[in-house]
Image (spheres, rainbow, N blue to C red):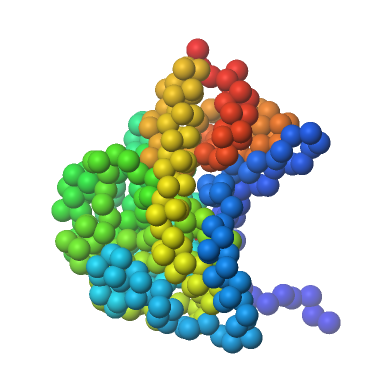
Amino acid sequence: MSESTPRLRETLGRLPAYVAGKPPTAAEGLTPYKLSSNENPHDPLPGVLEAITRAAAAMNRYPDPASSALVEALAQKYDVPREHLALGTGSVGLLQQVVQISAGPGDEVLFAWRSFEAYPIMTIIAGATPVQVPLRADEGHDLDAMADAITERTRLVFVCTPNNPTGAVVRQDDLDRFLDRVPDDVLVIVDEAYVEFVRDPDAVRGIETYRARPNVAVLRTFSKAYGLAGLRVGFAIAHGPVAQGLRQTQVPFGVSTVAQAAALASLAAEDALLERVEHIVGERTRVEAVLADQGWRLPPSQANFVWLRLGDRIGELVAACDAVNLAVRPYGDDGVRVTIGEPEANDRFLSVVAPFAPR
Ligand SMILES: *Cc1c(COP(=O)(O)O)cnc(C)c1O
């Protein structure tokens, strides 16, 4: 037998791994909490569970490949044409498609760094070149530097607002000034995975921006505020050619019948879900106030997590959290991202982190 293995694309060797948030360890005596993946801590609403139970009865059939009912509901909710919608297996699925339809070998994909770790991965999978522009000292996007980094090879720009993992938002007036400098034939994706948690009136309004500019599209997800992370459904709102490209490149039947039913039921139960979001925002305000009292000087978070720059004490904090059954998410030498969770989880985190505060 030959020793050789199949020849795969050499770009795989350059691919950073996607690091998923770890589950907490389950030492005895303390309820474990997962604060490492920005998940919604609330259990599913009973009505949503009932809807997916009904949908599960049809699991021997393929799903509606066009997700027609969900597309119709989203078109009405956001007042956009149905042709401007594309659904995906979470917005991560759409992120991959966005790169596929816009960039390949020799092309550049521009984004801030640190930002969502799927951006470099999807860019490298497509064979394109990631161009990463460091965040400003206040953890926000440096849009002037990003505009300066545009070349004739730039095909795609990601703007993540609120930014994962730092929680900072881009301001609408800053985005408008940036977009005035972006060539019309460069696609700009506004990734609004956490938009439901935003309370800053000056923050980007992605859908308004899409309406005004044919090269801008918005990505949204049911995973965070709507609590459907396990079912994989997100959507893009984009002008005709971009939305069509996304539909052309989707994995056939990727969004399951159960996911479609859950998303529809969640839209119908939106008031109850947004009340829960309000509760999480309240916890965020409380956590930030306690952190400020402890001595932390943090950029205000507009998402469902906080971000602590800790340099060489990252490992120590992660271990201290681990010792009390809290999973948090470290990022290299930069910092730790901690999801706003159940009040008890937040309290436990606040007591663990207190001794790490800068004084
Ligand atoms: C969580 C997240 C997403 C999408 O998650 P899906 O579960 O794939 O919908 C997209 N962008 C950012 C910045 C995120 O943090």
Q: Position of residue 72 (x, y in %)?
A: 34, 76
Image quadrant holding the N terminus, namely bottom right
Lateral position of residue 118 relative to residue 216, left or right:
right
Instruction: Give the answer, above or below, for where 74 lies relative to 141.
Output: below
* Residue drawn at x 49%, y 29% as measured from the top left: 287
Query: Between 27 and 50, which is closer to the camera in this rendering?
Result: 50
* Residue drawn at x 17%, y 47% as measured from the top left: 177
Instruction: Give the answer, above or below, for where 21 lies relative to 103.
Output: above
Residue extending furthest right? 1
Residue 35 lies in quadrant: top right
Instruction: Give the answer, above or below, for where 181 lies relative to 67.
Output: above
* Residue drawn at x 25%, y 75% as measured from the top left: 81
Instruction: Give the answer, above or below, for where 306 lies relative to 271.
Output: above
Q: Position of residue 145 (x, y in %)?
A: 27, 43
Residue 90 seen in the current view: yes
Q: Position of residue 90 (x, y in %)?
A: 49, 64
Q: Position of residue 317 (x, y in %)?
A: 63, 29
Residue extending furthest bottom? 61
Total residue callouts:
0
Lateral position of residue 208 relative to residue 12, left or right:
left
Residue 112 seen in the current view: no
* Residue drawn at x 29%, y 78% as measured from the top left: 83
